Amino acid sequence: MNMQIQGKIHATMEAEQVTQRFRKREFVLELEGESRYPQYVMFQLTGDRCDGLDGFAKGDEVKVEFSLRGREWTSPKGEVRYFNSLETWSVDRVGDSAGAGAGSNSASGPSESSGMFADGAPPPTDDDDIPF
């Protein structure tokens, strides 16, 4: 199930090669809403989609399409932990017309986005013991 949210880019991190097969890039959106304080929410891009954040800067108003993902992990000591991630399918600049500006993406869903899950496949998973 895909969800959408709109906010301002607060921070972008560099892509990180977590394992030989798994690469991720995180970014933070500042959300304004019912709370009197801004909310800072971290999202992640994985694999080839890490480059989809190039061309965006702090303060850019964007719409993010994402999936809520969760994972159970058992440590070598037998402790069970749970992790959540917001797996990003597409990042679209708000207010831009189709094709305007670097990193702009006017797709309505992941199957039409510029290189970000262009084939509509689900996000890659890594079967090792890393808890994220």
Image (cartoon, grey):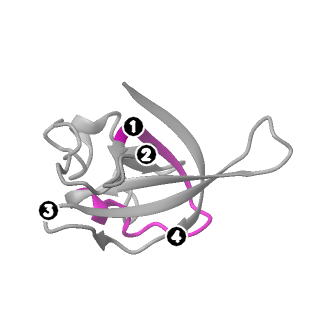
Confirm whether the magenta stretch covers residue 121: no
Residue at point 25% right, 54% down?
A: 129
**SS for tag 1?**
strand
Residue at point 19% right, 51% down?
A: 126
- The magenta span reads 49-72
Mark 1: few/some/many CA within 10 Å (<14, 14-19, 20+): few
**Residue at which label 2 appears:** 85
**Residue at which label 3 appears:** 21
Mark 4: few/some/many CA within 10 Å (<14, 14-19, 20+): few
**Of pointers 3 and 2, the one earlier in the residue sequence:** 3
Q: Quadrant of residue 20?
A: bottom left
Furthest residue toward front: 77
The alpha-carbon separation of the residues under discs 4 and 2 comes to: 22 Å
The alpha-carbon separation of the residues under discs 1 and 2 comes to: 6 Å
Residue 15 % position (x, y): 33, 71
**Given this view, does label 4 or label 1 mark the residue nearer the observer?**
1
Look at the numbered discs 3 and 4 and tell me whether their residues touch, using CB distance below 8 Å. Answer: no
**Given this view, does label 4 or label 2 mark the residue nearer the observer?**
2
**Residue at which label 4 appears:** 57
Identity of the amino acid at label 1? Answer: Gly
**Of pointers 3 and 1, the one earlier in the residue sequence:** 3
**Residue at which label 1 appears:** 70
Residue at point 23% right, 38% down?
A: 112
